[in-house]
Image (tube, helix red, strand yellow):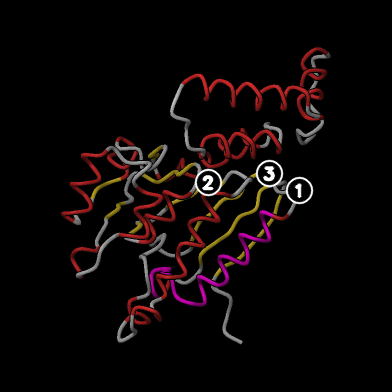
Amino acid sequence: MPAELVHLDVTAGVATITLDSPHNRNALSAQLRRELLAHLDTAIADAGVRAIVLTHTGTVFCAGMDLKESKGADAQQQGVTEVPRILSTLWDSPTPVVARLAGPARAGGVGIVAACDVAVAAEPVTFAFSEVRIGVVPAVISVTVLPRLAARAAHELFLTGETFDARRAAAIGLINSAVPAEQLDDEVARYTGMFRLGAPGALAGTKAMLRRERPATMAEDFAAMNTLSASYFASDEGQEGIRAFGEKRRPAWVPQD
């Protein structure tokens, strides 16, 4: 059996999924894709997991598709056809997902970053939509990237393939924060710590709300959101949160560590 390329560790309610294929810059090989999806499914199904962190070993977060596997394959055999499930699993996960980047991301790797709820990168980290420079189109990843990026930046960076740094990635909306390398883990822990304070059902409901298509009129939107809001106020989590607020204690879902 080949060595595992993606690892899962669950500690104190945080599932850490680590890409561990440094020999090919954590490229999206068939084995890595398969293992990443399996570990994501496991973490999402675990009721004890309150946040997921996606990170990596080696100097690169993810270099995109494994081009060695893509060489010579016809359109139906290209591994990129499996990437939508990875991106949609991250995007739709009811459990918040944080991308932790200590190294650069390229092409499909940037799509993964965009699919996560929160992304934190060390300041030296770089990004690039390098597809056009090898004669392909950043098509699949555009589904998760374009909702994040300022339109002008998307046109510029998709068309030029230019490398840009973590500070610009934060400025255009691709990531949430760029921090000195020595502060990276503290910044990730800050986010996961805040996620652990939120009610699991409310977090999942908020994610779904953020992803929904808005109705054509404000009246329709208010009607739908009023129904949603009232249902959560009346829910078990909502009532527990209201009681905890009045009793000046932590709600039952907050870890007591």
Q: Residue at x 62, y 67 (%)?
A: 38
Q: Identity of the amino acid at label 2?
A: Val
Per the image, label 1 sits on a secondary structure element best described as: loop
Q: Are marks 3 and 1 in contact (CB under 8 Å)?
A: yes
Taking depth in this image into account, of 99 and 227 the one nearest to the observer is 227
- Give whichever of discs 2 and 1 has the lower sequence position: 1
User: Residue 230, image x and y in percent?
Assistant: 70, 22
Q: Identity of the amino acid at label 1?
A: Gly
The residue labelled by disc 3 is 50
The residue labelled by disc 1 is 48
Q: Residues within 10 Å of mark 1 (few under 14, many from 20)?
A: some
Disc 2 to disc 1, how far (Cα)? Answer: 17 Å
Q: Tell me the quarter of the picture where residue 242 sits.
A: top right
User: Residue 199, image x and y in percent?
Assistant: 71, 33
Indicate the quadrant containing the N terminus: top left, top right, bottom left or bottom right.
bottom right
Q: Is residue 27 magenta?
A: yes
* Disc number placed over residue 98 in the picture, else none: 2
Taking depth in this image into account, of 38 and 189 the one nearest to the observer is 38
Relative side of 225 to 240, left or right = left
Q: Residues within 10 Å of mark 3 (few under 14, many from 20)?
A: many
